[in-house]
Image (cartoon, rainbow, N blue to C red):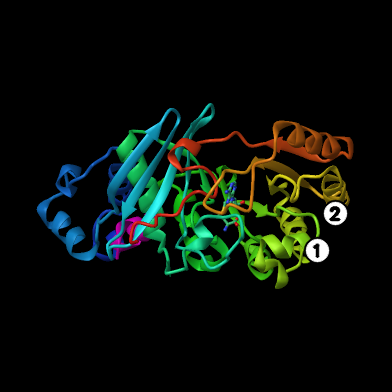
Amino acid sequence: MNIYGITPSELEEYFKKSGENPAKASLVFDGIYRKDILELSQLGFSDRVTSALLRDFSFELPTVAERLSDGDTAKLLLKLSDGEFVETVLMRQHFGASICVSTQIGCAMGCAFCQSGRLKRRRDLRPEEMVGQLVAVQREFGVKISNVSVMGIGEPFDNFENVRRFCEILTAPKGLEIGEKHITVSTCGLVPEIRRFAELNHPCNLAISLHAPNDELRSRLMPINRRYPVGDVLDAAEYFSVKANRRVTLEYIMLSEVNDEPYHAEQLAKLIGGRRFYVNIIPYNSTEAEDFRKSSRERIMAFYDVLKKNGVKVTMRREFGSGLKAACGQLSADYQK
Ligand code: SAH
């Protein structure tokens, strides 16, 4: 088993079973998560304990294949144990360091505007490979991550159990201890999994990649909409928001002359109605998909104003990392090519 794929209480169990003091678990997790301890021998355990740990656990992390940074954004290309590559992004924000984590190698969703969708889904990432992205970033840049966006390559709810487990490890007491409200999982709208997520005991925040206010347009941009139409997606999001007593973010990328007309904003406001959603307007980052262009500042402001006038809560996402091809939707890790 990989140490980055278990929780501190599971390691306590392990120590108990081997007749050791379970408090050793905290020392291990402190060492690997906070103190940059690279060698187990540095933890100060006896040789017996150290060799048992080395026998029973792998301490392997993804290795850094490439590192790019530009101002407050940095991107790591990580190589996994089977030779696959994955990308992860660090953003230094005023409230702390946040990371954008990938959940799959490639993605099966095929959204028309998204770079990650051009790579076929090759496999799911395991929990330790998601935790590994965070640990690699913390070590590489000497930061402590305080916020996690599960918005990198892949569809998190197409890898539900591993992502659920990842969130459990992130939030576990005596481990990374990142609060569930500091973690956001973003989905293109897999309805049964949104409902499953809502049923969890302490779910993280939920974001829905909406990007269009009606089925006709959304189905053109996002094939998944043919399976789960807009109305069903928002009903599931509402179910989450009531159950978790939390607002849900609807992400909306602004694609010039595609989904950014004032009447789209009106449709969107109507669709939301009185529900506890807020809209996060995202500037489109150009990719190899040449059919789309970024909306102008004027069009974005006009769209924003219509939403506001209709009583919708709305925020605008700051653009990070476009210079590094590390902005939303630009991750691709097409290094195998
Ligand atoms: N599969 C999940 C999470 C990964 S995508 C989801 O769909 O939510 C993270 C966000 O970036 C999504 O909202 C996605 O639609 C958006 N995105 C994709 N391509 C983009 C681009 N070129 N510019 C801006 N945002 C983009």
Q: Of helix, strand and loop, which one carries label 1?
A: helix
- The amino acid type, in three-letter code, at marker 1 is Gly
Closest to the observer: 314 or 254?
Answer: 254
Q: Earlier in the sequence, mark 1 or mark 2?
A: 1
What's drawn in magenta, residue-wise?
Answer: 1-14
Residue 162 point in image, percent of width and height: 47, 64
Q: Residue at x 71, y 67 (%)?
A: 225
Which residue, given by chain and number where applicable, does mark 1 sit on? 231
Looking at the rendered image, the quarter that the C terminus falls into is: bottom left
Q: Position of residue 268 (x, y in %)?
A: 82, 50
Residue 237 versus residue 159 in the image, above or below: above
Question: With 77 as the anchor, is 310 left or right in this view?
Answer: right
Specify the amino acid type for callout 2: Leu
Residue drawn where x is 45% and y is 48% of the image: 173
Q: Callout 2: helix, strand or loop?
A: helix
Image check: 67 left or right of 270? left
Label 2 sits on residue: 271
Q: Give the quadrant of residue 72.
A: top left
User: Residue at the spot x=40%, y=54% of the render?
Assistant: 333
Taking the magenta stretch, the answer to whether it contains residue 231 is no
Q: Check the image and name the residue furthest to the left.
A: 47
Say if residue 164 shows up in the picture. no
Q: Quadrant of the N terminus?
A: bottom left
Contact (CB < 8 A) between labels 1 and 2?
Answer: yes
Indicate which disc residue 66 carries. Answer: none
Instruction: Tell me which corner region of the image, top left, top right, bottom left or bottom right, holds residue 198.
Output: bottom right
Q: Cβ(mark 2) to ligand 1 < 8 Å? A: no
Majority secondary structure of the magenta segment?
Answer: helix
